Image (cartoon, helix red, strand yellow):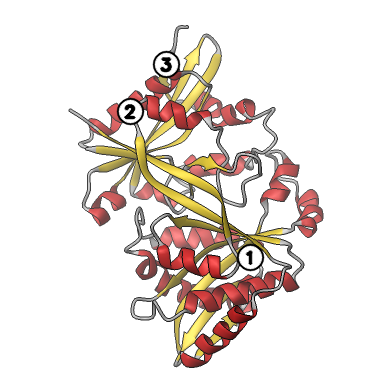
Amino acid sequence: MDIEIRSVDTHKDLKKFIDLPYKLYSDQKYWIPPIKREVFHLFNEKKNPFWEHAEKKLFIAISGKAVLGRIAAILDHNYIQFHDAKIGHFGFFECIDHTSVANKLYKAAEDFLRDRGMLEINGPMNPCTNEECGFLLEGFDDYPRLMMTYTPEYYLGLSEAAGYAKEKDLFAYHMKVQQPLPEKVARLYGRIKERNNIKLSHLDIKNFDKELVKIKEIYNSAWERNWGFVPMTEAEKDKMAKDLKTLIVPELLQFAEIDGETVAWMWTMPDYNHVLKKMKGKMNPILFLKERKKIKWARVITFGIKEGYRGRGIDAVFFHDALETVKKLGFTDAEFSWILEDNVMVSRAAVTMGGEIYKKYRIYGKKLKG
């Protein structure tokens, strides 16, 4: 089979790049098609502020008229500066089950990054850890939750055949919301809250801009020591807030205050993938409003605690409050993801609340030789 690796330099080829997964997964039960318009915006340098500090090069693999695969090489200058490491990324990898096609795609991304002085490559990052990332490692018999990936199992083999090895695994915990929490958890929740004088509040959507300031103050400092983390710019935070404002359920965005200072926040979202599955890649406001009422899963997406307030059990207080809230709102299940495999403290809190690991995701890495 003759395989051509083509750089995506035209709108026509960008369309082929974006269309590929809709074709590859056409018979796949569990894949969730994203809104195609939003995918175009993701790659648009005028609409996505991520590209203000990052470069990308997109490639497609073609045989005749058939598109067989795709990959993006990503050079995030903020990542390089923040971690003081010459590491580039690959992302948006999709491919038929064919080793030669995958090898050629990986080589194209590696060459691009190597030519720019990078010594390592890891991924998939779509395009960074603030968005979807990782190949699915365990849990192929279920739909992904909101902003989580679904990829076929053979991607793991293709990556390893191309010389990639495990860089980091990410865990997703499942919690049955409607079952009562253990009595000891309720007692622990009360003691921690009282001992630390923790006051919980939920998002005041009428004062969204003011609430956003509190989130921004905590966000970057709370995650700065996490593997793979890159501080979001003000423009990136503003865009995320704008995109998600209409989707946020105020009761599911919590703040923790101690002695008048906001020291932590936690964000849970309904699993809108239920709706996206129905919309099949096209925005349909009427269908969205109808189907969002049927969502039964929630995803605990993220939380952050200021330096100096960690280890006090604020995470356990958040989990307890979030689970009680999603229960009142009628959800039946919740996912807490993603958790770094070596984040023992957060994993312990998830297990205490009745969570069990039910999915894993893998980030791969490779040294780039000269």
Circle 2 sits in a helix, a strand or a loop, which is it?
loop
Position of residue 358 measured from the top left corner of the image (x, y, whole percent)? 58, 51
- Label at residue 348: none
Q: Residue furthest left?
A: 370
Q: Quadrant of the C terminus?
A: top left
SS at mark 1 in the image: loop
Name the amino acid type tagged 3.
Answer: Ser
Q: Name the residue under label 3.
A: 100
Horizontally, is 83 left or right of 199 in the view?
A: left
User: What is the C-alpha distance between the residues marked 2 and 1?
Assistant: 41 Å
Residue at mark 1 to residue at mark 3: CA–CA distance = 44 Å
Residue depicted at x 28% and y 34%:
113
Residue placed under numbered mark 1 in the picture: 248
Q: How crowded is mark 3: few (under 14 residues within 10 Å), some or many (20 or more)?
A: some
Tell which tag, 1 or 3, sits nearer the viewer: 3
- Label located before the other in sequence (2 or 1): 2
Nearer the camera: disc 2 or disc 1: 2
For label 2, the residue is 163
- Residue 138 is situated, as x and y percent measured from the top left of the image, at 54, 42
